[in-house]
Image (cartoon, grey):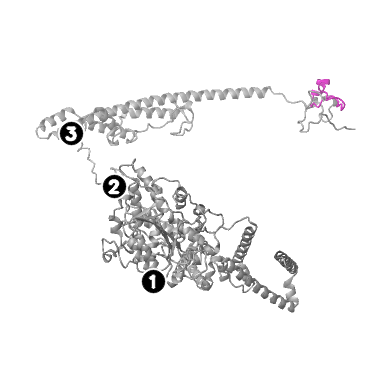
Amino acid sequence: MDPSQDFKALREGVQAALVTVTRSVNGLASEDLHFQRTVHPPVARRLDQQTDRLLQLASGLLKSAGKLTGQQTSQLEDVDDIEIQWRPVVDVIDSLLEKADTCLDEYTGLVKRKDAPTYDSGRDAKRSKPTSDRLEWSLKRANILKPQNAFERKIDNLDPEPWKPLLTNKPHAKVPLEESLTTFADPNQNLQYKHPYEPEILSMQYPKEVFEPCEPVKYLPIESKKAVWVDTYEGVLEMLEELKKATEIAVDLEHHDYRSYQGLLSLMQISTREKDWIIDTLVPWRHKLEVLNDVFADPKIVKVLHGAFMDVIWLQRDLGLYLVGLFDTYYACDALNYPGKSLAFLLKKFADFDADKKYQLADWRIRPLPDEMFYYARSDTHYLLYIYDMLRNELAELGKYHPNGKPIDRVLAKSREVALQRYEYPLCDLEMGAGSRGWFNTLVKAPTLYNGEQFAVYKAVHKWRDDLARREDESPYFFMTQQVLSDIARIIPTDKKALWTLLDSQARGLKAHLDSLFDVIQEAKAKGANGPTMLQFFEQSSTAAAGQTPLGDSSAKVSVHVDGEPLSIQELKSEHSQLWGSMALSSAWDGSIRTDTLDEQVEIPFPYSEVTFSILGAEEEIQPSQKVAEEPDAAATSAREEEPEFTLKGGRKRKAREAELEPESEPESEPGQQQPSSGGDASERDDAEMGGTSAAASPSASDDKASDEAHKKPKQKLIREELEALRKQGKEAGRELIRLKREERAAKKAACEQKRLEKQQKKQQKQQQQQASGASVEEGEQQFDYSKAQSVLHAPRDAGGGGGGGGAANGTKGRKAAFDPYTKKSGDAPQGARKMNYEKGGRTATFKS
C-alpha cells in the first residue's frame, strides 16, 4: 500500500477525533458544572475521575515533548498546577510547533540542513556560511551529567582561603616556585597570591622576528588535513613534542559557565603552521595538562590569541597554565584602527571565511562533539597565524611614521598586561554587596528604588541563591535569573504558591528548596521593616567613599545614618577640598600668610590716592561743618510749614520726567561715613573735632618737633611722619569737597521744592476753574416737560420706528418700504454668508396676516 495513503488516512482519523473532542469540551464548558456537582453527587465523582485522567494524559504528553525538546517539566498534581506551571507548558508547546515548522520546511525544501563539510568537498569547504537558524536547545542547554563530578582534583567553592595557583612545577623560571608563591593585600585588604610568572613576563624580550616584516605564510586548506582530537595523556605528550619545535602557536578556548559556579574550561584549540589539535579539557586527569607550560611559559615561542582577557584567567583557574610571550591580535586591531575588532572580522578580512558565531553560545560540554561544533572550534585557530603575519607587517609599516613610539610596542605592552592578570575567588558580601558576585554593581544600574523591606529581601535572597549555587556547583542564574530575583524583592510573595508563580521555567530546580526560600523571604521582610531603604544605603556608601578618598580627609568621621532623615550640612562638609586638598584657594583665606599693618608698609606719597582714601576712609575722622549742615535743614523746615500734605520720605522716582524731583530726605553719606546730625550739640562736636584736627595739623608744632628729633629717629620713621602729614592734608581737602557737594545738593533741593510749589498752585487753580464751570452748567439746565411729549405706546405707524417726537418731523423719510418677495436681490440689501454649495441667492420673509 502507498505510504502516502496510510499517512492520509491517519491524518483524517486524528483530525476527526480532535474535532469530536473539541466539540465535547465546548459543550461542557457552556454548562453549569458547579451546579451539577451540587445537585448530582454521582456527576461530581465522574467529573473528578475525568479530571484526574486528563491530568495524567497531559503530564505524560508534556514529559514526552520535554524529552524531545530538551526541556524539563514537572508533574501536574492538581488543577492549580496548570496555572502555576502555565509558562513552562506554553514553552514546551511552542518548541513543538517550532520543531514541526522546521521539519516541514526541510521536507518541502524551503530550508536545507547545513552539515559540516567533509574533507574531500572541494575548495569552497573553507567557507562556513552562517545561517539565520537559532541554535537548537539541545546544543545550548544540554541535559548531561556534570563532568566536574568525575574530576580527580575536586572543585571547592566554599574555601574561605585565597585562591592558590595550581602550579606544582615552574618551567623556564627565573624565580623559583617557592619564592613566587607569596601573598599580598589587595586594595580591599583581602589576602591574595601574587602572579607566579610575573618576573618572567616583565623581564622577557620578544623574538626579533616579531618586530620585523615577514613574508606571510599562507594557511593550508582546511580540507587537506584532519584536526587531531586529543583526549588521552599520551596524545598530549605527543602534541607537546611537536609544539616545542614551533616558533609561534595559535591558541583559543571554549568555556561553559551555566552548570558550574566558577565555570568550566571545556575545550582548547592549538594550531601550528602545519597542524591543528582539539584538546578535551573535561577529562578526569585534566590537572595533568600543566605539562603544557613547557611551551606556554617559553618566551621563545609566541602565543597568538585574540581577545585573551578571559582566556588567561581560565587557563590559570582550571589547568594551571600561564602565558609568557603573548601576542593579542585584538590590540593589534586597535592600534591599526580597524572598523571591527572581533575575530570574525579578521577571518573575513584576511581569509574570506564567514564564521558562524551562533556556536559561541553552545554547550561545549557535549561529548562526543558534533561535527558542526568541531569544525567551528578548529576554524578559530586554523587561520590565526596567517592573520598574525598580516598584522605584524601592517604594524611594521605603520611604525615607520612613528619613530618615537612604534605601534608594535604598544600592542606588546598591552599583551603583557593581559598576561599578568590573576584569578581570584568570586566573593559575595551580604551587607555591602562587594565582590564579583555581589549585588552592589547590579543595583547601582537598576531603575527600581526599593523600600526597607524590599531592599532587605533582595539582599537576603541574593545571598541565599549564591550559597545554594556554591553548594550545588551551579551558576546562580541556573536557579534564579536576575529578573526573577527583582520580581521577588518587588512583590514579596505572601505564600508559597505566589512564590512559585514568580519562578520562570528555568528556575524549576528550586522546587525542592521552596520552603527554605520562603522562610528567608519572611525573615528578611521582618528585619527590613525598620532598616534603611536602597536610596539611604547608597547615600551612606557615597558619603563614606567621599571621606575615604585619597584627595579628601581620610580621618574625617562618617556618621552612620539609618533613621531615614537627611544628613546635615556639617556631616557632609569636609575640612579639605577633595580636588585641591589642603591648598588654600585664596591668600585671603590662608591664615598662615600675615598681612602687614598700615604702619609697616612703605607707601608712595601720591596726593590723589590720599584724597581718595580720605573720602572713603573711616567715619570718625570725617565730619561736616555746622554751617553746611544747617542750611538744608532750614530749607526743609520752611518747606514743611508751607506744605501740609504728607509726602513719603525717600520714595522711589516713578517717571522719567520727574527724575529731577528728589524726595525730601537727608543727604546720603558716602560709604564708610555716618549721617550728619542736626542741632547745636552736633555742630559743637564738629567744631571741637575740627579744632582738634587743625591743632594737630599745625605746621609750626610739627616742624619744631621734627627738628628736635630729626637726629634721633631713623630714616624710616621720618618717612612715616611725612606720610602722616600728607594724609592729614588729604583729609582737609576731602572735607572741603564734601562741603561743596552738600551745598550743591541743598541748592538742587530748593529748586525742586520751588517747582513742586508751582505745580501745586497750578493744580489748585485748575480745580477752582472746574468748580466754577460746573456751577454755571447746573444753572443753565431746564426741566423736561412731560405734558408736551408725544406718546410712546401709541406712536403712529409711519414713524419709522422712531420714538419720542421725532416721528412727525421725519415724515416719509423714515418709513420702511414694504417687502416684495418677487423682486431680485438688490445690491444695498444685507447679504448672508456664502454657502459652500453655491446655491442661487434669494430672500425670505415671514408674512403676517
Coordinates of residue 339 in the picture (x, y in percent): 45, 46
Q: Is residue 836 visible?
A: yes
Q: Are marks 3 and 2 in contact (CB under 8 Å)?
A: no
The residue that mark 3 highlights is 720
Q: Is residue 810 highlighted in magenta?
A: yes
Name, please, the residue furthest toward the left: 711
Per the rendered image, the range of residues in magenta is 800-824
> Which sits earlier in the primary sequence, circle 3 or circle 1?
1
Q: How many marks are shown on the rendered structure? A: 3
In the image, taking residue 262 as reference, residue 168 lies left or right, namely left
Coordinates of residue 160 in the picture (x, y in percent): 37, 69
Q: Is residue 486 highlighted in magenta?
A: no
Q: Is residue 189 visible?
A: no
In the image, taking residue 750 as reference, residue 612 lies left or right, namely left
SS type, badge 3: helix
Q: Does 616 appear above or below 73?
A: above
The residue that mark 2 highlights is 583
The residue that mark 1 highlights is 153
Q: Nearer the viewer, mark 1 or mark 2?
A: 1
* Residue type, numbered disc 3: Arg
Coordinates of residue 381 in the picture (x, y in percent): 43, 56
* Residue type, numbered disc 1: Arg
